[in-house]
Image: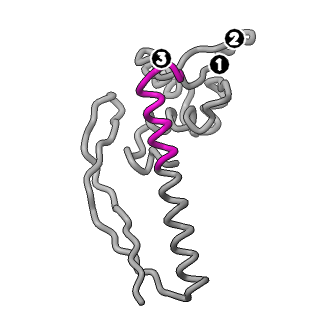
């Protein structure tokens, strides 16, 4: 989960990431519960917060089951989607470069990791700093 790695494993972030990864689908709270392993109460708590922030929207209702999806009219939701796609692209590019260097030219790749602080959306919806490892790849001749 890309955003969870970046912003930390907050429940709100994990639920948001499920909706981002399924941006073209409508998901019900029970489906999100199953994908996240969170309790029903936790899922509804954060769905309500995301609805209040207009990052997600209610779509259709089947019986008593409400469905939700990412609100692509919301600037924050669109920016998060762009950010996730950029991170995925960067990871794929690094993987391709590393594999190419190692297999095609038989070069060793050394990985350096630095601790950096990134913003984390905590459960209360506030930002806090979280220390994560930033990975950089260097090729040695």
The stretch of residues the image draws in magenta is 71-86
Q: Residue at x 60, y 83 (%)?
A: 103
| Residue 61 circle label | 2
Above or below, 53 against 20 in this view is: above
Q: Are marks 2 and 1 in contact (CB under 8 Å)?
A: yes
Closer to the camera in the image, 85 or 20: 85
Q: Compute the Cα span from label 3 to label 1.
A: 12 Å
Q: Compute the Cα span from label 2 to label 1.
A: 6 Å
Q: Are marks 3 and 1 in contact (CB under 8 Å)?
A: no
Quadrant in which residue 139 is drawn: bottom left
| Residue 51 circle label | 3
Number of numbered discs present? 3
Q: Earlier in the sequence, mark 2 or mark 1?
A: 2
Residue denoted by label 1: 67
Instruction: Label the magenta part by its dominant secondary structure.
Output: helix
Mark 2 residue crowding within 10 angstroms, few (<14) / some (14–19) / many (20+): few
Quadrant in which residue 63 is drawn: top right
Give residue 51's position: percent from left, percent from top: 47, 17
Q: Earlier in the sequence, mark 3 or mark 2?
A: 3
Q: Residue at x 44, y 37 (%)?
A: 13
Mark 1 residue crowding within 10 angstroms, few (<14) / some (14–19) / many (20+): some
Helix, strand or loop at label 1? It is: strand
């Amino acid at each position: 989960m890309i955003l969870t790695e970046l912003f930390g494993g907050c429940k709100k972030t994990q639920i948001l990431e499920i909706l981002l990864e399924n941006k073209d689908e409508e998901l019900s709270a029970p489906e999100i519960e199953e994908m996240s392993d969170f309790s029903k109460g936790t899922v509804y708590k954060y769905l309500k917060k995301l609805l209040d922030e207009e990052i997600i929207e209610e779509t259709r209702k089947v019986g008593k089951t409400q469905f939700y999806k990412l609100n692509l009219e919301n600037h924050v939701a669109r920016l998060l989607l762009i950010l996730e796609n950029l991170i995925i692209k960067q990871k794929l590019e690094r993987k391709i470069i590393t594999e190419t260097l190692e297999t095609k030219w038989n070069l060793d790749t050394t990985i350096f990791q630095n601790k950096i602080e990134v913003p984390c959306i905590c459960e209360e919806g506030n930002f806090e700093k979280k220390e994560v490892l930033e990975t950089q790849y260097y090729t040695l001749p």
